[in-house]
Structure formats: C-alpha cells, structure tokens
Amino acid sequence: MRTPSSPPAQALGTILGVAFAAAAVLVMAPVALAHGGVVPEAPTVASFVLGWSFDPTVWLPAIVALLLWRSGVARANRAHPGRPVERRRTAAWVAGVAVIVVALDSGVARYDTTLFSVHMVQHLLLTLVATPLLGLAGPITLLLQASSPATRRRWILPVLHARVVRVISFPVVAWILFAAVMWGTHFSALFDASLETPWLHYVEHGLYLATSALFWWPVVGPDPAPWRMPQAVRPLYVGLQMTQNTFLAVAIYMAGEPMYAHYVSTVRSWGPTPLADQQLAGGIMWLGGDIVFLQAIILLVAGWMRDEERRAPAEDRRLEPERAAIREREARLAARRAAEVERLVAEAASAPEAVAASSAVAASSAPAAPSIPSGQASGGTGASR
C-alpha cells in the first residue's frame, strides 16, 4: 500500500495545488491585467520589447510548467539512467513556454486589442510556433518515463486509450477541429466578444492551444498517439491545413469592410485605418502561416527520407528469406529449362539417324517388282514380227 508521501501522491498534490492556485489567480486578477480600456501610445520597437505587463495569469502557469518539466526530467533520469531525457526536448519545452509568454504578456499582448494585425501575430505564435515546440518536447513521453509502472497502468494509459481521446485525436477529426476553431472564431461574434470580455479571451486562447496541439500531435514529437500516421502521409496532412489557412487569410484580406466592431470603435490617433489594419492581418496570416507550414512540410519530408534510410537495412534483412526463396525457385526453373533444352538438342541430333533407319526399314518391307521371263519377252518379239 502506498503512503501519502509516495511520488505519485506528491505529484498529484502538486498538480492539484497548482490548479487551485491558477484558478484563484484567474478569479482575483483584475480585468485591467488582460484588457485595458485605455488605448496605448503608438507602438515602437521599445514598446514591443519592453512592454511587459507581468500578468500572473500568464506567468504563474508558465513557471509551473517549467518546474513540472524539471521535476519530470529528474525523475525520468533517475528511473532510466541509461536513457536520459535529451536536452533538445528540454530546449523545445522551454522555447514553447517562452513563446506563449511572449504572445500573452509582452508588447504583443499590449496591442492585441488595439490592432488586429498584432492580434493575428499573437494567434500565429500560439498555434503555429508554441504548440509544435511543446509537441517536439514530448510531454506525454516524459510523463510515462517519470511515472511508476503502476501509475502508468492505472492512470496514464487508460486516459490515453479512452474513447474520447481516441476520437478527438483521430487525425481527420483533429484537422477538422483546428480548422473549425480558426474559421469559427474569426467569422463569428466570439472574436468581437473576446476583445471586450477578458474571460472569453482566455477561452479563445485555450481553444487555439488545445486544437492546435491536437493537430500537431500526430506529426511532431516522440509522444505516442492512439493513431499512428505514416510518415508519407504527414506532409499531405500539414499541406492541406496550410491550404485552408491560406483560404481563411485571403477571406480576411479581401473583406471589403472591417469585420470587427471593436477595432472600428477603438479611437486612436496613430496607425492604419481599421480596414488597412485588417488587410495587414490577413497578409500576416497568409504569409506567416505559409512560411511556417512550408517549413514544417520540408522537415516532415526530410524526416520521412531519414526514416526510410534507417528502415532500409532492417527491411532488407526481413525480405532476405523471401528473396533467397525466389532465387532458389529461379535456379530450379533455370535448371529445368536447361535440361529441356538439352533434351531437345539431343532429339534434334538423333533425328537424321532415325530418318535413315526408318527409310531402310520401309525399303526392306516394300514388295519386289514382278520380273518377266526372257523367253516370254523374246517370244513376244517374234510374234510381233
């Protein structure tokens, strides 16, 4: 029986404590932390780089995520000293968390409710940069490595194999969910409402992070997934998502009037008009999204080629018995054909002798021509005279 101080109990207590703390911060944090009613001054390089608000609703989860990762790495390395967690996975996790902090707390967040173009940069950072980096880190793999066999069997594996997880992680479903959230938020009242209501903005960011994580799960990182996607299909999977992202960006760019009343009603004395800002946002989504997706496709194709090279020797060893059997059958067939050819040659060589013998036999067995006596022959002559 486990005591309350066992590692799983400690981990569960830590997670619950973090969840309660985060919930308390979300409830008690003032609205001004996320959305101020005052239009900031014109953006500059300094305001983007130094314009941090240090929102606890952003920093607290980020710090907790980093501490949990560090604890998980230490526990996994103790449990598997021969296979320590790769540093590149830790670097990917730290980078992914850092991108989320930059998107939600830096100067980007300062102007996201003032300029649609900046808001679009924020969304691209969350969906196309942060979540792929977190997926490359392999958090599920780390959780499996750091957990005891009993914990894996009792808690982790049942969740991974649950029906709802299998449904939402099916590649087609994950692809559709991500695309539906992107189109649904940009072409519904939710987008405008989220600009006015902080908690709706949190919900919107949560939807972006969750659905983009589901989309990237089958194609990046070492994490096991309920559905295995072949390496050859992954570039197509990402390429189709790039296509729908381009269509969405073009739809925003080509709109003839501002789509969101919030940006129209925001009075500022600087920057582009709401329509020009919207067109800039569509261009950022178009160009930025295509660049990220194309890079992902190139990396996936390169990974596919490396996988084929790695699998080639094993595939050759697996196919060698079949190839040996084929060679053996070919050798037997060649031997039979050679024997058949020799037989035909021998028959052809013996054919003249057989013809001569058959002719001799035929001549000896033919009846002799009747002979006429000489007396009869001469008598006949005399009679004729």
Image: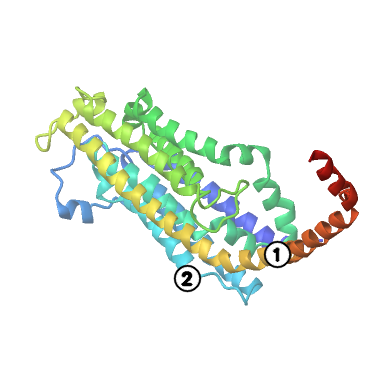
Look at 68% across and 42% down and name the residue there: 162
Q: Quadrant of the C terminus?
A: top right
Count of all numbered marks drawn on residues in the image: 2
Measured from the top left, where is residue 203 in percent x and y?
A: 44, 36
How packed mark 1 is, by other alpha carbons closer than 10 Å (few <14, some 14-19, many 20 or more), is few
Task: Tell me the CA gap for discs 1 and 2.
Answer: 58 Å
Which callout, 1 or 2, points at the residue further toward the start of the chain?
2
Q: Residue at x 70, y 64 (%)?
A: 334
- The amino acid type, in three-letter code, at marker 2 is Arg
Residue 132 visible in the picture: yes
The local crowd at label 2, few if under 14, some if 14 to 19, many if 20 or more residues have their Cα within 10 Å, is: few
On the image, the x and y values in percent for residue 140 come to 58, 55
Q: Nearer the viewer, residue 68 or 34?
A: 68
Q: Amino acid at mark 1?
A: Ala
Residue appearing at x 13%, y 33% in the figure = 268
Which residue in the structure is indicated by mark 2?
87
Residue 17 spot, x, y in % from top left: 57, 52
Disc 1, SS = helix
Which corner quadrant holds the N terminus? bottom right
* Closest to the observer, 110 or 320: 320
Which of discs 1 and 2 lies nearer the camera? The answer is 1
Q: Relative to residue 247, is residue 207 drawn left or right?
A: right
Give the image quarter of residue 192: top left
Mark 1 touches mark 2? (CB < 8 Å): no
- Find disc 1 in the rendering and name its residue: 334
- Left or right of 128? Residue 172 is right
Helix, strand or loop at disc 2?
Answer: helix
Relative side of 148 to 361, left or right: left
Name the side, left or right, on which 67 lies relative to 79. left
| Most foreground residue, 362 or 78 | 362
As drawn, the residue found furthest toward the front would be 385
